[in-house]
Image (tube, rainbow, N blue to C red):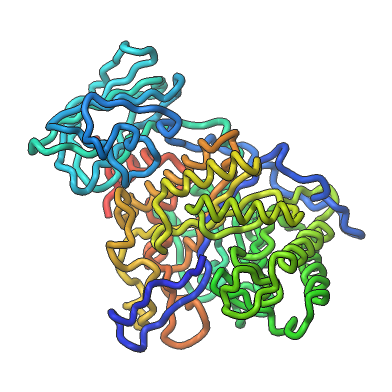
Amino acid sequence: MPLLPRSRRSRYGAGAVLVALPLAVAAVILPGPWSRAGTTTPMAGTAPASAPTQNAGQAAPTVNWALDGTATATTAESANPAPNAIDGNAGTDWCTSGWTGTLTVDLGQVRSLSDLGITLDAASPSASATIELASTAGDWQQIRALKDVALDPGGPMYLPLPAGSTARYAELTVYSDTGADVCVGEFRAYGGDPAAAGMDLGTDLSFTPQELAAGAQFSYNGKPGTPVTIMRDAGSNYVRMRLWVNPPAGYSDLAVDLALAKQVRAAGMKIYLDIMYSDFWADPTKQNIPAAWAGQDLSQLTSTVRSYTQQVISAFAAQGTPVDMVSIGNEIRNGILWPAGEINCASGAGCGGWANLAQLLKAGVAGAEAGNPAGHKLLIMMHYDQGADPTDSAAFYSTLESNGVPFDVIGLSYYPVLSEPAISGLKANVDGLATEFRKPIVIAETQYPWTLANGNSPPGDSTGDFAWETSQIEPGYPATPGGQLSFVTDELSILATAPDGLGAGLFYWAPDWIPGVPWEPGTGIGSPNVNMTLFNFEGAALPSAGIFQNPAAICEREAPGSVPCVIGG
């Protein structure tokens, strides 16, 4: 998608900085039938490089089992029916049509449950609630801690269950504090999902080398660390890194990435390489040919893409850090290497068209496979940006297939603050793509704000943020660490409950990009991303750094003994 923040000129004046750059998310590689034949092509003169065992020993992610369920209610407003309470989107409501009502959720089978979660609509009155569970219909069991619970509107709340709890049914009865209708944005039933234990869970840490070089200090639960070690300790098993051909000094070139790859592998994590085929930022608004490749015709570019990709993948392997997943281009909705490989004519110039793009992408795939060491599993991703657009996403991947472009993984970006549809659109897209294409799906980039404050102001620059006003915030997910955590864990549940287990992973983009490193070189330039990180402006990990953990357990650590538990702002 075009990653331009909304214009800040009306707020900051004519000199305001407008930023265009890609955002990102994290992903995980699942073992088994998803690798294509030929992705372990031998590389002459190179021994098989070691790699971490395939997500070995990874704990089962906590998911919201209510997404797989059905819901009915004793009473409901006609526009806000019971199923809205378990659709994975806290911005759609079940509302009582009176001062009280009961929601009954059938999880479809008996599930092991650790916690429950509830979000009331921000406009709902406060309410009290009682929740009962049953393994067989009608055999309701009262849990003392879940009787007459006080619920406040606006943010996610968590309710712990006794250890070893199992249930198929949950019954939520709400009582309005004012007499007005109560509106529940989301009812969640959390439990571990062993089938999702192989998911790729990661973050894009491309800015880590620059942040550390600039003197940034990071910590997790008061303990110093680097973003690599902190995110590993918080549950990541993968790191994404971008690669530019010849960027400004200090930014993500091959030498920088190779050094980062050593840190990642030493931490026991896998490597996802995002090759941009450009000297600097590449996304649907721009895909500029590297300066050293200028003037090449299609045939020459094809050869260059293949040889460059092979050299890059070989370089990672040669130092014992082979790439585990690679995307051929970044957010390639409008193609790569414009105008030769452009589609949709986004630049306004003549497009090369789909045949050209397919030829270049095939060259990238061939180069990656040629550079991959024998016996090492390398997955090929094609990365599309509009993660909540089922129609255009399906058309894009269908056209890739009809043009014979080989790939293993569907990669999506999803940034609701950049005017993408609500999270229910993401669920529809993930489910539809899984059903149609039978390939694993990774959210390759995603973010959500933990505040609307501008952390660039204290250092003295006027860089505008991607997220700065309440109209960009998704209903049910406030701009707080708790809202950020709830949003990403809801995304993760959408993936974990995708058809046939094809939700493969998630990558959070630039969680480490705190104030101090500019999006491009220059004086008075900052980051437009500082309020969507997983660290505060000073580098201390937020509660939301635990995006791959049980959100209720994180809340209990932040506010022990609170029922319901709420992560503060």
Q: Where is 212 relative to 323, above or below?
A: below
* Coordinates of residue 525 in the picture (x, y in percent): 44, 82
Determine whether, in the image, residue 70 is placed left or right of residue 469: right
- How many numbered badges does the structure rendering display? 0
* Coordinates of residue 187 in the picture (x, y in percent): 32, 35
**Which residue is located at x 70 percent, y 65 percent?**
354
Res 298 → quadrant: bottom right
Given residues 61 and 332, the one toward you in this image is: 332
Res 542 → quadrant: bottom left
**Which residue is located at x 60 percent, y 78 percent?**
250
Determine whether, in the image, residue 136 is placed left or right of residue 329: left
Given residues 443 and 156, the one toward you in this image is: 443
As drawn, which residue projects farthest toward the left? 178
**Which residue is located at x 51 percent, y 65 percent?**
1
Q: Quadrant of the C terminus?
A: bottom left
Q: Is residue 229 visible?
A: no
Given residues 31 and 543, the one toward you in this image is: 31
* Coordinates of residue 479 in the picture (x, y in percent): 31, 57
* Coordinates of residue 43 in the picture (x, y in percent): 87, 58
Q: Can residue 330 be seen in this view?
A: yes
